[in-house]
Image: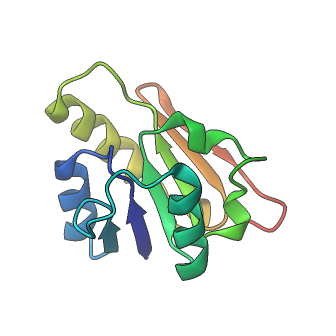
Amino acid sequence: MKLFANENLFEPIIDYLRSLGHDVLSIRDSGLSGIPDEEVYHRACKEKRVIITMDKDFSRMFRFPPEKCGGIVVAKIYKRTVDETLSIFKKFYESLQEKDMLENLVIITPEGVRIRRSKTG
């Protein structure tokens, strides 16, 4: 799956996603740090990549419709160590299927996963 890792996503999560065989484009690795959320979204739309982020602004479906890009996964896992965050992310990410993410909004929290399906997803 083609993913677009926002710059606030912890590096171990990016490494984990790559270890699963995903094509992960990282904003930091691409020299795009500091670009606005709108540009992140437009680049993901252009390449049909799923945005993976810890930025809760991306959970605003009217501002960032997930069906226009590959989909959006927001990890709302805050105030934890990197290792704790990775552990929580892995636990719930493993329960997802590609069809759950494509063109949908997925929110991962320490309590579980919520999927807001788009009209097309």
| Residue at the image position 50 percent from the left and 60 percent from the top | 40
Q: Going by the picture, which residue comes out furthest to the top?
A: 79
| Residue at the image position 37 percent from the left and 54 percent from the top | 94
Q: Quadrant of residue 84?
A: top left
> Taking 43 as reference, is 100 above or below it?
above
Q: Quadrant of the N terminus?
A: bottom left
Q: Quadrant of the C terminus?
A: bottom right
Residue 114 appears anywhere in the view: no
Residue closer to the observer: 53 or 32: 32
> Taking 6 as reference, is 89 above or below it?
above
Residue closer to the observer: 120 or 57: 57
Q: Quadrant of residue 15?
A: bottom left
| Residue at the image position 41 percent from the left and 40 percent from the top | 54
Q: How is the image coloured?
A: rainbow
State the count of labels.
0
Where does the image place residue 92, in percent across and percent down from the top left? 40, 43
> Taking 94 as reference, is 84 above or below it?
above
Where does the image place residue 18, in percent across and percent down from the top left? 23, 69
- On screen, residue 57 versus residue 23, left or right, reads right
Where does the image place residue 57, in percent across and percent down from the top left? 58, 38
Q: Going by the picture, which residue comes out furthest to the right?
A: 119
| Residue at the image position 23 percent from the left and 38 percent from the top | 87
Residue 21 appears anywhere in the view: yes
Where does the image place residue 60, in percent across and percent down from the top left? 69, 40
- On screen, residue 45 versus residue 17, left or right, reads right
